[in-house]
Image (cartoon, rainbow, N blue to C red):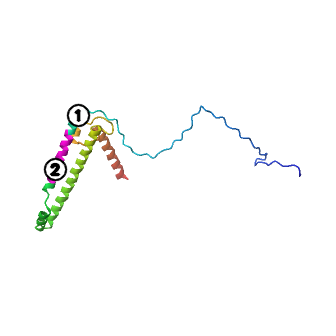
Amino acid sequence: MPGKTKAKKSSAGKPAKKSPTKPQPVNSKKPPVAVRVSAPEVAVPVRRPTKVMAPERRAALHRMLMGKRQELMQEITGNLGASLTEDQRRRLESAMDVGDQSLMDLDRELGISLMEMRNKRRQLIDEALARLEDGTYGLCDDCGVEINEKRLAAVPFAKLCVACQSKQELIEKIEKGEEREQ
C-alpha cells in the first residue's frame, strides 16, 4: 500500500510512542546531596590544649631537666677526655697480642655504644626542654593528665603517664607475640 506508512513496532509488538519529556518540578526544600570522598587516613598527632602550668612547677621541672642535661654532658666530655690519643693507642697496640687487641676493640665499641646512648638521652632531654617552652611538657600525650614528678625525675623525657605507658607496652607485647606466631 503505497500511500500508507506503517508505524514502527517495538520489540513487544506495540507501536513505539515518543513521550514528551516534562521538566521535573524542583523541590527547594530538599537539601543538596553531599558526596563524601574518603581521604587516605594519615596518623596525625593530637595536640591537646595546653594547660597553664604553675610557675613553681615549671621552674622546678626546668631545673631538673637542666641538671640531668649537665650530668650527661659531664659524662660525655669526661669519656671523650679519657680516650687514648692516636699515638698512645698505636704504642699500646704494638705491644699486645691478638687477645689483648680483641679486648681493646670490644672495649672501644662498648665505649662508642655508651656514648651514642648518652647522646640520644641528651637529645631527648633537649626535646623535653622544647616541650617545656611550648607548655606541653609534663602532660601525657594520650590522656592529657599531668605526669607525676617522680616519674619525670626518673625518666625526664617521658611523654606518657604510667598508666598510658603500661597500656602501650602491653599493646606492643601483644603485637610482637602475634608477629612471632605468623
Magenta highlight on residue 29: no
- In the image, the segment drawn in magenta is 63-79
At 21% from the left and 41% from the top, the residue drawn is 65
Q: How far is disc 2 from disc 1 in space, using C-alphas?
A: 27 Å
Circle 1 packing at 10 Å, graded few (<14), some (14-19), many (20+), is few
Which is nearer the eye, 55 or 21?
A: 55
Disc 1 secondary structure class = helix
**In the image: residue 142, left or right of residue 18:** left
Q: Amino acid at mark 1?
A: Arg
The structure residue drawn at horizontal position 19% and vertical position 39%, both measured from the top left corner, is 63
Mark identifier at residue 57: 1
Query: Amino acid type of disc 2?
Result: Glu
Q: Main secondary structure of the magenta part?
A: helix
Residue 20: quarter of image = top right
Q: Name the spot of residue 138 as percent of width and height, x first.
A: 27, 37
Residue wearing tag 2 = 75
Left or right: 181 in relation to 74: right
Does residue 118 appear to the left or right of 26 in the view shown? Answer: left
Circle nearer the N terminus (2, 1): 1
Residue at the farthest front position: 133
Q: Position of residue 167 (x, y in %)?
A: 31, 41
Residue drawn 17% across the image and 64% down it? 102
